[in-house]
Amino acid sequence: MKKKILFFILMLSCVTLSAQQKQSPYATRINRVLKRMPADNQLQLDSCMQQIAALGINGLTEMACMLRLPGKGDNTALQYALNGYASYVAAATRDSLRTKAVKAWGRALKLTTDASAKIFLIEQLQFFGDNAAIALLKPYLQQPRYSDPAIRVLSQIKTSASLIAMELALDKAKGNSEIALIKALGDRRYIAAEGAITLRASSADPVLKRTALFALANIASEDSEPVLFAAAEKVNFSYDSTGATAAYLLFIDNLGHNWPTAPAQTAANKVLRQCKGDSLSHVRIAALKTIVDIMGDNATNTLTLAADNKDPQYAAAALAMAGRFMNGANADVWLQKGERSQPATKAAVITMLAATKQRVAISLCTKALKDSDVRVRMAAIEASAQMQSPEMLSPLLVAMKTADSTEVKAIGNSLLSIRSRDVSGYVAVALQQAPPFVQITLLHVLAYKKAADKERFIRLLLNSENPDVVTAAKTTLEAVRE
Amino acid sequence: MLANGIYDLALNEYREFLLQNDNPLITEIYTCKIIFISCSGLLNFNHNMEQKKNQSRRTFLRNGIGAVAAFTIVPRHVLGRGYLAPSDQLTKGVIGTGGMGKGHFGYAGTRVVAICDVDKLHLQQAQEVLGEGVKTFDDYRELIQLPEVDIVHIATPPHWHGIMSVEAARAGKDIWCEKPMTRTIGEGKRVKEAVQQYGRMFRLNTWFRFEDNFYGMNTPVKPVKKLVNSGMLGWPLTVTLNRHTGFDWKQHWVGKTNLPVTPVPAELNYDRWLGPAPYKPYHPDRVHQRFRGYWDYDGGGLGDMGQHFLDPVQYILGKDDTSPVSVEIDAPQQHPDAVGTWRRITYTYKDGCKIILDGEGTDEKAAFIEGPSGKLYPGFRSDIPDLAKKLAAYPDPPPQVTDFLISVKERRQFALNEENGHRSCTLVNIAKIALQVGRSLEFDPERQVFLYDDAANSLIDPPARTGWA
């Protein structure tokens, strides 16, 4: 009996030993890391990632291969670990870990058969994939199931090797893979792919055509101009499913960033000449913006002319562009423009100069407050609030005497925005000689400013013949004493 | 002067009339009378009426700057709260007709003429609300081509906002976009470029920088901005957003992992719902009302509330044209698909100003704003004695265009637009990226890239899926 028991124990030990020998040397360490997933903080995360790094290429490969089929187990802890490591190795100064990780990923991709696990692994390469990952991804570029994540990774690698890989894959690609490759090559402005993409720009498939047109627009080679222009002209520069007009406008905008810039300017001017209709206002604006971007500070004359355009959207857009290029030198040009312009334009110029806080606008606003056109006067009042300049105090208070009720209210609001300690003082003095409606507005200003030191000026209005003024004076006195 | 006198007399007459009558027809006739009086001397009324018959409504609005200025001589409030003549209305096409979209049908001064949704059920329910006259689409590109649409209102999940905004700008539409403005920094840059290239008006639909009480602060932003501008708090400032200062981070917006594959409902075009997002098998948790828990479409409570909370703070601190130089995080590790919780996010600007997002509300005594010279707490409480009185002497912040209708008609940039909206959304997006890569990051506000971190930079403008097209 004893012999039997001893034999049984011996056999059991052998089986256990054999099982232990078969078990991976990494299993315990991997499980230890997985149990700590998700890490609670950065310190713990770094510690876990260091443990994964210590597994080496073989251990990491084994870990990546542990992803189970959907519905056959929970991959959550593994996803935390693998994604965490993908981000970890992509930080600065971790280049050697990154190289090892790419190798491990390459092995794991070959060993993994499940599609969802493969896609997960490919997607992680977006964080740390480099030239070494390109060879791993090549087999997937034309496979409908994997091409999308694989192309996204190659697009992120952004090296000439990744672009060449995509260009070569484009030859045989079909469907979504073809579209994704064209988009990626366009986004990365890969000029060597221009020919292959141009062929697709005349496709009958609107999605393929659209992708090709935008890719050519991004590549922005001058040679593509006739193709892109023809496509936009064919749809009369309207918006359509192929995006031909937008692609052409993007093209000339990108072309404007190249040297020489003349071709872009010529193309933009061509758009301005050809697009006349009301519905193409935005197209003209886009062309104008390209011209202005190229000309920079020298675009002021172009913009002053555009500001007079009969199309109010175009004129307003020109002023918005002028605002972005505003400086002391061209502010004077705009000042002169404002003085000479028709009321609508004058009002818009005042608004633009004030929005860009140009001091030259003060003199223009002062004159504008006396303008016969209500639009100009209102623009000057609002501009005073924008500029917050104390120099506008007196002109505003003077303008109040002849203003209508809307303007009086607007001036009252503007006074509250003026940057000066003297606002209450000026208002208190003006209070005495103003018409009743203005007095009420000015009393509101003093109440809002809690101008207790102006009580004696307010008290004088308690004797007003106008009962509304008396009531307002009483309310103001209470407010300033609070 | 005479014209002004007639105008004022007519206005007074009209005010009294409004107090006595509430018949809409009579009111409208009277309104025309006032407009006629206010326009006399400025416009040849009869001539314009003749011309108007030959103009389309859209052309009328396009040529509207002069006309608008003349019409606004009659203040809108005088015409009665919310009153707007039909010819003055702008038309909207709404993309996304779930809870958010439906909630935005009824803005005063606008009329919905077209709707789009990839869920047939949503579309059908929305049409029942709006009536048969509204055009319906399941592809947004068809909606934005409609000549009768002035404004495209984007009420989809955030992963669509960037693409749709750019396309709408290319089609010459003005844009009303729900928050967060874009899901990535790259999309935000493209929206800004497209809106400015095509001269469009863009409104990001969070309004706290100019309207309403700023959440639990129980005060609008204007006096807070005034206080900061006054310098009374000193500089640099630290802003803390936690439940004690009035901000709930909605940490329940977390995603679930290990989702089982579920059949796609017949009414949903799931491929188009995903659009630019990477393909993931369908599960009801990914879509309608629950999508915020997944990085591919949004960013949890931070994505949902971040721009609501942070945009006014950016405005208050005067940071509308810049971004922080660093973002520090204290958070558990995040899953690559499902959004998790976080404890604390700290942004630091170049000048030392800080914004602290205290997700768990651990700092009970935190002030909303703290500076070297003073603190401000909810309800405008402060350790500065007689704050309200002292503050009254300081100027108000410059006014902003806060009515999108005015912005569209007068072509004036809206208060919360493509530029400052992109910057406040960048606050949300850089924190999301820091959470996703699991570490604190340094950011270059000019180039809008992270320093020394490829993983973080790979999330600035990740390539989109193209299959949906």
Image (spheres, coloured by chain):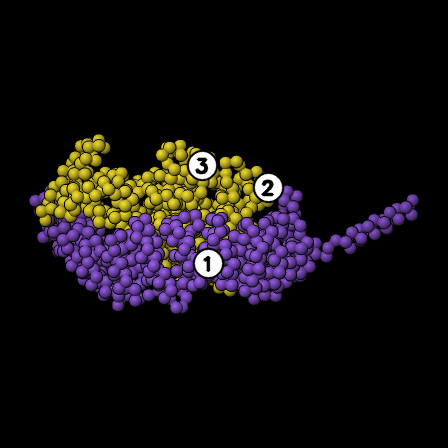
Chain colours: A purple, B yellow
Kindly report the distance in space between the C-alpha atoms of the residues bearing marks 2 and 1. Answer: 41 Å
In this image, A124 relative to A456: left or right?
A: right
Q: In front of the other: label 3 or label 2?
A: 3
Q: Which residue is mark 3?
A: B122
User: What's the residue type where badge 1 is placed?
Assistant: Leu
**Chain ID at mark 1:** A
Three-letter amino acid code at the position of disc 2: Pro
User: Residue at horizontal 31%, vertical 63%?
Assistant: A325
Q: Nearer the viewer, mark 1 or mark 3?
A: 1
Q: Nearer the viewer, residue A410 or A67?
A: A67
Residue B117: where, in percent of width, then height?
A: 44, 40
Measuring 14% from the left and 53% from the top, which residue is drawn there? Answer: A372
The residues bearing labels 1 and 3 have C-alpha atoms spaced at a distance of 38 Å
- Find residue A272 and report its horizontal and vertical position in percent: 32, 57
The quadrant holding residue B231 is bottom left
Number of numbered discs visible in the structure rendering: 3
Could you tell me the amino acid type at mark 3?
A: His
Residue behind mark 2: B260
B88 up-or-down from A165: above or below: above
Answer whether residue B198 is visible to the viewer in this image.
Answer: yes
Same subunit, labels 2 and 1: the answer reads no
Which of pointers 3 and 2 lies earlier in the amino acid sequence? 3
Give SS at disc 1: helix
Foreground tag (2 vs 1): 1
What is the chain identity of the residue bearing mark 2?
Answer: B
Name the one closer to the observer, A95 or B441. Answer: A95
Q: Chain of mark 3?
A: B
In which image quadrant can residue B22 be found?
Answer: top left
Residue under label 1: A216
A215 left or right, relative to A408: right
